[in-house]
Image: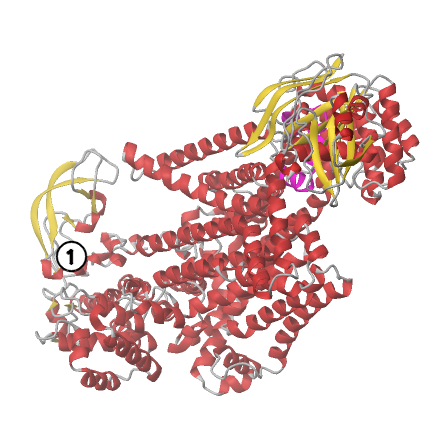
Amino acid sequence: MTMVELNNVSKNYRSVKAMDGVSFKIPSGVVFALLGENGAGKTTTIKTMLGLEAPSSGSIRVVGMDPRKEAIAIRRAIGYVPDAPKLYDWMKVDEIAWFAGGFYPDGYVQEFERLAGEFELPMHVKIKTLSKGGKAKVALALAMSHRPELLILDEPTSGLDTLVRRKFLESMVDVASEGRTVFLSSHQIPEVERVADYVAIMNEGQIRVCEKLDVLKAEIEQWVVTLENPNLRLPPCDSFLLTHEGIGQRRQQLTVRTPDPNALWALRDMEGVLQVDVHTPSLEEIFIAYLKSGKREQPRSNSDAKPKSVSVDEEATS
Amino acid sequence: MSTANEVLRWKERRTLLPVWISLGALFLFGLLMLMAGKTTGPANEQDIGYLTLFWIGSSMIGLATGILLFVPEREQGTDLFLAGLPVKSSAVSRAKLTEALLVFVIFVAVSLGLVVAAFWIRRGEFLLEDVRWQRVAALAFIPVQTFLWSALCSLWFKTSLNAVISAAALSMIGWVVISVGSLIALEFLFGVQESNGQIFWGIVAGHISLVLLLCGAVWRLSSVWLRGRHESDTRSEVASKKQLAVASVSKKQSASYSMKSLVWQSVRLNWGSMLLLSICIVAASFIATLIAVSQQYTDSFGYVFSTYRSLLAIAIFAGAFSGLLIFRGDQTDKSFLFFQTYADFPRKVWLSRLALLCVSLPVVICSFQWVVASLYTTQAGEAIRELPILPRQMFFNTNVSNGVLIFLTAFSVGQLISILCRSGVLAFIFTVAACFVLSGWFDTILKTWEPLFLFTVPLIVTCLIASWWYAPRWISQRKPIRSMALPIVLASSVFVACSVGYVLQRVTIPRNSIAAEYQEAFESHDQFLNSNKERFHSVFLMKEAVAALDHKVLTDEYAKLPLEKRGYAENRSNQAVDEHVRVNNEVLAKMEEALSYDLVYHWITPTSLSEQQSQYRTVAELLDFQSQHLKRKNDVLKYRDSLAAEVRAAWRLSPNAAVQAAEKVMKFCQWSEMEGQTDETLRSGIAKLKRLRSEIFDRKSKRIQYEAYFNIRRKYQENSNEQNFFTGVLFRGPMYWEQLRSERISLSEFARLDQAVRNDMQSSQSFWDPSGAPTSQAYLYQQLMPDVNPSEMQAIDHALSYATIRVALQVWRLEHDSYPETLDELALDGKSGTILNQVPKVSGGTFQVDFGYFPNGLNRAAYLPHMTTYTERGWPEVFDASKAIPSNTPFLLPFAGNFKLEPVLTGTSKNNDAEFLYGYTFVNPSQYGPNVNFFFLQDNPQRDYVLTVRESDSR
């Protein structure tokens, strides 16, 4: 079942294009990470999914519903933790649970109490006395207490310390294992890499790539080429090249996706090339490569995954 | 399990509980203070005072409830939390509006209850039939509209400060525009001129339309308020601000560059609020000026709207909110945290805010508005059009300098609040409270004639030093309690020290301060009474008398009388009149003694015309009771003296001196026809009138300095080479100045006039009007006697002459049992000697003619022109038959002219069943035209001019 489906969605604020032809699908029971820099359009994407913002064009389906028409039903079916959640400081933890419980079916408060126990949250203290991590836990518990099919978390780990962050992200895997879907928006890439099943990279309102993390890591390689002569020009490999960077005088690094198998051998055999090392890049390196390349890949299903030709960034090669 | 509505309403109640408790306490305290003033003060209050009580309280609470609806959620970011919940925006709004309306209604009910209680305490019972419900209904729209405007602004604006400023301004502007617009629409559509009912319903319809429109807008916008948050806009804005500010405080940049960029950044941060505030100031000043100008022509707002007070309030609010803007922008998290992170020269940050934000725009706009309005409404009046005068007036007009001082004081206090209060709503409440406190403080200073400079400059300096001291610590996050307490302690201690120092030592009071002289005088009472210092003695007596005035006797009866009859002693029972005079016997004695001194006018507080009028009425009302008491006792001589005291009070205390005095003089006509008059008493009456004339037209009197000019003008106007007095001064200056000296003008007044004319001569082109318009003369009169008009002086002259003849006619009648054939006989040697040495004439600038005297009356009814009325059928003139002078009745007109017999259309006001009758109508030769325009005569019934009046008919 597809939990979220965005089809060519755009959103404009006057002259600013916050979303530009965004399309992706999220199946159920996965952890989906939307990665991007500040201002990339992640929060706008989430708000359009929640029905808080109307898209300028395109169509959105969340949990099988249209956010423009059934925003309340969608919010009832999902849990949402905004970026830097602002809660009513003057309420106690149990009070805010009771308050939020008014909007959901029976059992909300009991589930909240269970989660609070898991998160080691005190129930009878005012929220303003909690630490930043404590407040984040309250927000998360509030979003999860009605056992939503889809959990949307906007920058959930910002401000949390390392241990809490790690524990929190691991709990997301547990949620996914229960058959529910987690949508994470973050720029904490190393943390996300450990838990995400799917990854979408967003930049300047556009989705650069949306892929299963395993596939992405399997298909993308980094070649570090050591040259005899610094002025030597490498052969063109535009069809699979993402970025091309110089490392010092004689070494160059190429990030490639699903390269032609013969291309590596041809490079190694090339005159003036002393050595070619092949690495598997981290998600952070993939992220940077896509941001630098400026390439935009069309989303594809797992079955028809095959390399697509991408243009070479002239600046990267210069 | 609770429902969504229940939890939402619970949240609203809990969120706002502390606010309601604090605001409610403040509100109740303020209302109780006002109520105490209304129930214990002198009995000259009007309904509008009680309505103000209700109106101010309800409007303030409407403003608070409306603003607190949506803006705080937006400021704190909790609206996003609500947006994530599965609840409709309209459901949240409905819960909010329900709770706010509940609170609003409770507060309005409380204030209404207090008003009713104030009525009850004052009058002893509820007199619902006396309440002017139309006025209550019209004013009740203000709080309702304020609430709705506030709710709307709460939806529109991102910050509570902007929302508050806009809501307050829109409420007032909206109310005025609808009221005035409805009147114009009625006039345009139906030509309604006189029907109060139609005007009322027209205005109410306009207000109801606006209320419905606002309700619709609030309902529509509130149902979608959780959607459409333009986060990306805010983010880009914040990003650009940060980028800008990082550059501005970067050490790599030069000092001047960083200063420039800081100023620019501060402007960018606050320009919206600045613009909004400026618009509000301009709009408020414009409305105040508009009302002031209309007041000049109609005097309709005289008791309700004090222009001076309004401009004072505008200056205070403009200053306080300008000050509040200094750090308001920086109090938001983003800017605040930024400076704590980056700025390592906080003093420069503070200076950048001070430099531009608070000195430039509001000061210029407020000062300009103040200058324009004060020039237009005070002494310079006409001269505002004479542009060369403007700069000089700007510097020397006391009102302007007071306005600037008041603005600066409020500004410095607002600045301190802006740095001390982080919460926008709290800062607003404190600022409004400070405005009220400052308003009272300034009022007290001005009322006691103390120099404003002395009591405001220390406060301004202290507040500025305090914020200078605290701001760097605040910006760099070094803000222990000590650094917050010190500025407050410093400001308070200077304030207290200043007041205490003044009271104890008075070393800093200027030697020429009137207040200092009075203070000295009052402290040595006995010595003072013996010192025969006329000025202090009279003022002291008057103060003592008014302080001891007792109104309690009148309270019971006051409540039972219809509104329009309450102000007059003649409508009171004998018991009430006698008791009131008996209780205040000593007060009356003191008053009469004080009034015998010319300089008793120093008792009048020079703050506003309406206050002066109020002070005068306190005295006039008691004297009126005394006169009524003596009249009913038929004590001819004491009644005469009481009337003389009334004339003196009017002349020396009333801001409308000449007209009021003329009205009182006319009472001698009825006095002369009282039973029990003898030849001797009537002749003493003539002597009393003569004495009053000499007192009023005494050239040493400050109030009559005008008369010297009047004489000179008459003397030299005959010279055809000189168009008017002013051109005469220019041609033959030294001679005129000599003449002025011989007329014993006081030195200071002379120096003032001399300087004014010399300055005007240097820029004389504005006075060389070829048409010879009387602008220059008016200007001179204004310089000398701003509150007495030349034509009004003619009125009192007329009244004295007329009353003298009327008394003389009664003397003649006692001696001859009939009236003389001509007035000239009064000056002839009769049985008991001459009654009058010379028969007074109707005199204008260049003519003298006899009063219109008809000893045998006319053979038909006679109609006077000012009794003309108009009908809806379009007939140009209908003479009011009920007010005609009956046939064959002797009468003496207070002006010159004759009658002609002709068909006249008779009827009564608003009566279209008029009919043609033969009667006499008044013909006034054109050269005596101005005589019939004395408006003090127009209100008198024509029977006042009839000579044989039965005692029972007299008022």
Q: At label 1, which amino acid type do we have?
A: Pro
Give the quarter of the figure containing the C terminus of chain B.
bottom left
Residue A258 visible within the image: no
Residue in the foreground of this view, choosing between B153 and B261: B261
Residue B169 visible within the image: yes
Q: Quadrant of residue A41?
A: top right
Query: Is B79 within the magenta?
Result: yes
Residue in the foreground of this view, choosing between B317 and A119: A119
Residue B515, percent from left and from top:
51, 77
Residue B466, percent from left and from top:
66, 67
Give the quarter of the figure containing the N terminus of chain B.
top right
Judging from the image, what secondary structure is the residue with disc 1 in?
Answer: loop
- B401 displayed left or right of A223: left
Residue at left offset 23%, top offset 84%: B737
Q: Which residue is mark 1?
A: B890
Residue A96, percent from left and from top:
80, 33
Q: Mark 1 packing: few (<14 Cα in 10 Å), some, or many (20+)?
A: some
- B726 displayed left or right of B621: left
- The stretch in magenta equals B70-93
Residue in the foreground of this view, choosing between B517 and B894: B517
- A313 displayed left or right of A118: left
